[in-house]
Image (tube, rainbow, N blue to C red):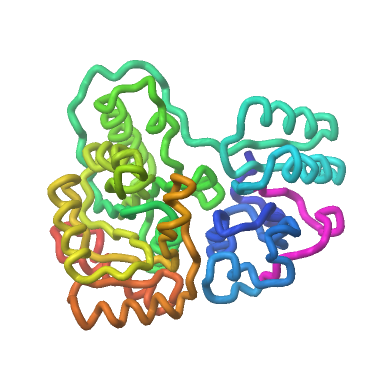
Amino acid sequence: MFREGDIMKRKAIIFPYNAECASLVRNRELLLNHEIVACVSPIGYGLQGKDAAYAYGGENTGIVISDKKISEINFDDLLVCESSSDFDTFIMPQVKLAAECGKNVIFLYNISQQQKKEAEETCKKKNVKCVVLTNRRMDTDKLFEHEIIPLSVPVVFVASVIENTNKFDVQLGLRKFLQEEGYKVSQIGTKEYCELFGFHAIPEFMYANQLSEADKIVWFNRICKSIELQEKPDIFIIGVPGATMVFNETITNNFGITAFEIANAVRPDTAIMCVPYEGYDSGFLKMIQTSSKYKLDMQVDCFNMANKHFDVARSKEEKKLSFITTGADLVDKRIEDLKRDTEIPIYNSLNVTSALEMYSYIVNKLSESDFGTVS
């Protein structure tokens, strides 16, 4: 795509900006080849003129969501992020406008073949690039061996009991912390656009129906081992997509199957579990630790509480997960209340101080093991 090592970073607009792509703004200094110069949202989002942090309830970023047309902004690439906006009504008009301005278009999520064809043809007419970032593919030659090859470096999982719990934000924050501490990091993350940050996305075959669970486990193990041998990291971070458990009979979270497959492919040395902002107690946290240990052989050493409150009524009505965003300060208060009841470490990734404490805690846990690389 666009090669690392260019003298100047490419100027990028995020559209349609929403909480789904907030990690791009919060962690923009980690982007290899792009500088975020503007975030643009449709009028109906009600975000114009507000700091980008308003979309996810965090600390101000210094980037104000623009009300300008993208044709009025100096940029090189349009980063199209996933949203609920209609493709034909909201997305394609901006793609056409970007192409007419001679700008490249990068979709940060998978779109349908018809949508891809339309976008590519639009860009081709104006001699600009159209890139759709998808999960990594693997050579489909059948693997007959089914033994698991262990990794030789410490592995950290970032998982969640339910979706929409700032999991990718934690993955990026941990990556930044480790790199600043001088560690070489290999990483597989939960977003299609991980390559913008210089690491790998969960491979596409993990979501395919054509493969058996056993094949997925072995293939994922081989990809991780291949990355380890090629990149020679000090530590390996793996973001676990989806949720680790069933929420209820209606919202099953795919029964935590993907988490089960990944945990069988690679054994983590420690894990951060992301949880929503809810009124649970220390007993709930202990239950999650016990469940993760015996179901997934995953040692959950600490928790990250997101500023997302589960909307029970709306979720029942729509039969899908719905959340209400709360302020990060409310999360801090809830954590302080929990600390009076438990010694289990729980943090807030949207609070800089708390996040650094969490990442330091993980490094210290690994340092207690026999691994010589983390010390």
In the foreground, 122 or 27: 122
- What is the magenta segment's predominant secondary structure? loop
In the foreground, 89 or 238: 89
Give the left or right position of residue 66, taking residue 186 as reference: right
In the foreground, 321 or 373: 321
Residue at 65% of width from left, 37% of height from top?
A: 131
Residue at 68% of width from left, 65% of height from top?
A: 47
Q: Is residue 65 magenta?
A: yes
In the foreground, 105 or 348: 348
Residue 109 lies, in percent from the top left, at 57, 41
Q: Which residues are magenta?
A: 63-80
Q: Quadrant of the N terminus?
A: top right
How many numbered callouts?
0
Residue at 28% of width from left, 46% of height from top?
A: 246
Residue 335 lies, in percent from the top left, at 32, 77
Residue 201 lies, in percent from the top left, at 45, 42
> Is 143 placed above or below 308 here?
above
> Is 112 placed above or below 90 here?
above
Q: Quadrant of the C terminus?
A: bottom left
Q: Is residue 240 magenta?
A: no
> Is 89 placed above or below 36 here?
above
Q: Is residue 55 visible?
A: yes
Q: Is residue 7 visible?
A: no
Residue at 24% of width from left, 17% of height from top?
A: 144
Give the left or right position of residue 210, taking residue 299 as reference: right
